[in-house]
Amino acid sequence: MAAPGHARPRPAVYALATAALALHAPARLRRTRSLAPPEIAVLTALAATAVAGVALVAERSGRELLGFDLEAPALTVPHFHFAGFAAALVAGLVCRAAGGSTGRFAALSVPAGTPLVVADYSTGDRVEPSGAVPLTAGCGPWPC
């Protein structure tokens, strides 16, 4: 709850901010023209924020998202903030700074694992390990 005299943040405003950040991804790709592992991770981080923003609006407004019950958006928001944005960004930065095969693995496995974990929402627990394993492995610890 917002403090007296302070406006509550609106999920729609946040969603617009995340969309603006996500729209930076294609511009960045046009500028860098690179799909090197650290760049893939950074582009994933930028795009994942919009997914979190849309899920937040759906969850806060009490609306189903893509046919899922309200639990899915509630899980999607933190998932895409941590795994989609933060872990991908850190993996990309580690890869850029440290390089080597470990850094490249992190920069590719986090973006690969994130959508696979989300696929678990629609397929049940059958595919969860296929996303959780690369995502977790890419999150470290990185012996760089």
Image (cartoon, helix red, strand yellow):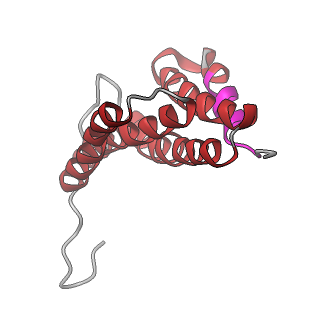
Viewer-closest of 139 and 41:
41
Q: Magenta segment range? A: 131-141
Query: Which residue extends farthest bottom?
Result: 5
Q: Percent x, y for residue 123?
A: 50, 15
- Image check: 37 left or right of 74? right
Viewer-closest of 97 and 3:
97
Residue shown at the point (60%, 16%) measured from the top left: 127
Quadrant of the rendered image containing residue 5:
bottom left
Query: Which residue extends farthest right?
Result: 143
- Image check: 108 left or right of 80? right
Quadrant of the rendered image containing residue 14:
bottom left
Residue 123, placed above or below residue 41: above
Whether residue 139 is in magenta: the answer is yes
Residue shown at the point (30%, 22%) measured from the top left: 67
Kindly report the secondary structure that dominates the magenta region of the rendered protein. Answer: helix
Residue 129, placed above or below residue 32: above
Residue shown at the point (31%, 46%) measured from the top left: 56
